[in-house]
């Protein structure tokens, strides 16, 4: 703890924080640029992307290829979008402190949609896992950081803490194979890359059985990672899986 405090003082002295958007010194995202984060006003069917209210599948044939039941996306993800810069800095520049800002983004969308979806009982936040080699390199699982920070924000919010008091966290999924990064692969390669790469921790069975699982990740593109994780969760007793992500790639 003391070491981290001293390290941050040294880093801030030699490498002062600058806004990822405008370059202003002081914070990684300045107050003015924070307003540029563009939230989705409508959700979409995860397959055909037809607009709807809560990110569910618009028809049966759209859901046939998927193991999850719903996908909630927080922000627009254009090439120059600020949210993309923040996520990239969080994951690849290892700026772990950005987790709070990103969790606030998830919280905003989660609370809005909670008026249409019952997220109060039998709900578990589950992070998408990363392999232990990548964990060792990065030092943290970005999805787990987001899930835990989101849970903390919800349970300490004066207006919503009682509503979400019963939500749990379960780090129950295990990445068993070290894979090529999904972002660098085509859809067919992604599907093959992920097959049988996710396992379930047997000690977590009671945490998942009969529960609504909110599967949390930073970015979904083809949704193959979410799909493989959802398959494992349902095989181990989850009754419903809702993906919750910061953004959806094109």
Image (tube, rainbow, N blue to C red):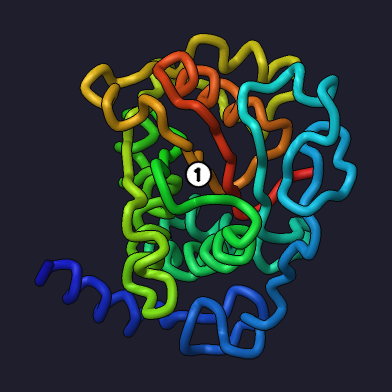
Task: Locate residue 150 relative to residue 31 in the image: left or right.
Answer: left
Expressed as whole percent of the image width and height from the top left, the position of residue 19 reads 57, 80
Q: Residues within 10 Å of mark 1 (few under 14, many from 20)?
A: many
Q: Residue at x 43, y 40 (%)?
A: 127
17 or 143: nearer the eye? Answer: 143
Q: Residue at x 68, y 68 (%)?
A: 82
Q: Of helix, strand and loop, which one carries label 1?
A: strand
Outermost residue on the left side: it is 2
Task: Locate residue 52 relative to residue 105 in the image: left or right.
Answer: right
Expressed as whole percent of the image width and height from the top left, the position of residue 190 reads 67, 21
Quarter of image, res 95: bottom left
For label 1, the residue is 216
**Looking at the image, residue 35 lies above or below residue 57:** below
Whether residue 85 is visible here, answered yes or no, is no
**Looking at the image, residue 206 lies above or below residue 27:** above
Q: Residue at x 54, y 50 (%)?
A: 118
Expressed as whole percent of the image width and height from the top left, the position of residue 32 reads 65, 89
Q: Quadrant of the N terminus?
A: bottom left
| Numbered marks: total | 1
Task: Locate residue 236 relative to residue 10 in the image: left or right.
Answer: right
């Amino acid at each position: 703890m003391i070491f981290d405090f001293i390290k941050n003082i040294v880093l801030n002295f030699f490498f002062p924080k600058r806004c990822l958007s405008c370059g202003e010194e002081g914070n990684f995202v300045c107050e003015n640029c924070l307003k540029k984060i563009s939230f989705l006003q409508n959700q979409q069917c995860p397959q055909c992307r037809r607009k709807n209210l809560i990110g569910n599948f618009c028809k049966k044939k759209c859901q046939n290829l998927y193991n999850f039941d719903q996908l909630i996306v927080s922000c627009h993800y254009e090439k120059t979008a600020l949210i993309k810069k923040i996520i990239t800095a969080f994951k690849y520049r290892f700026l772990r402190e950005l987790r709070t800002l990103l969790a606030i983004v998830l919280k905003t969308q989660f609370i809005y949609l909670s008026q249409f979806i019952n997220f109060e009982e039998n709900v578990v936040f589950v992070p998408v896992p990363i392999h232990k080699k990548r964990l060792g390199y990065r030092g943290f699982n970005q999805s787990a950081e987001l899930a835990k920070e989101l849970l903390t924000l919800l349970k300490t919010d004066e207006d919503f803490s009682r509503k979400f008091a019963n939500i749990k966290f379960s780090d129950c999924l295990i990445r068993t194979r070290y894979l090529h990064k999904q972002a660098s692969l085509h859809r067919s390669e992604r599907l093959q890359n992920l097959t049988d790469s996710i396992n379930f921790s047997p000690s977590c069975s009671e945490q998942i059985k009969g529960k609504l699982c909110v599967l949390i990740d930073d970015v979904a593109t083809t949704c193959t990672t979410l799909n493989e994780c959802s398959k494992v969760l349902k095989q181990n007793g989850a009754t419903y899986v809702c993906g919750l992500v910061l953004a959806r790639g094109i």
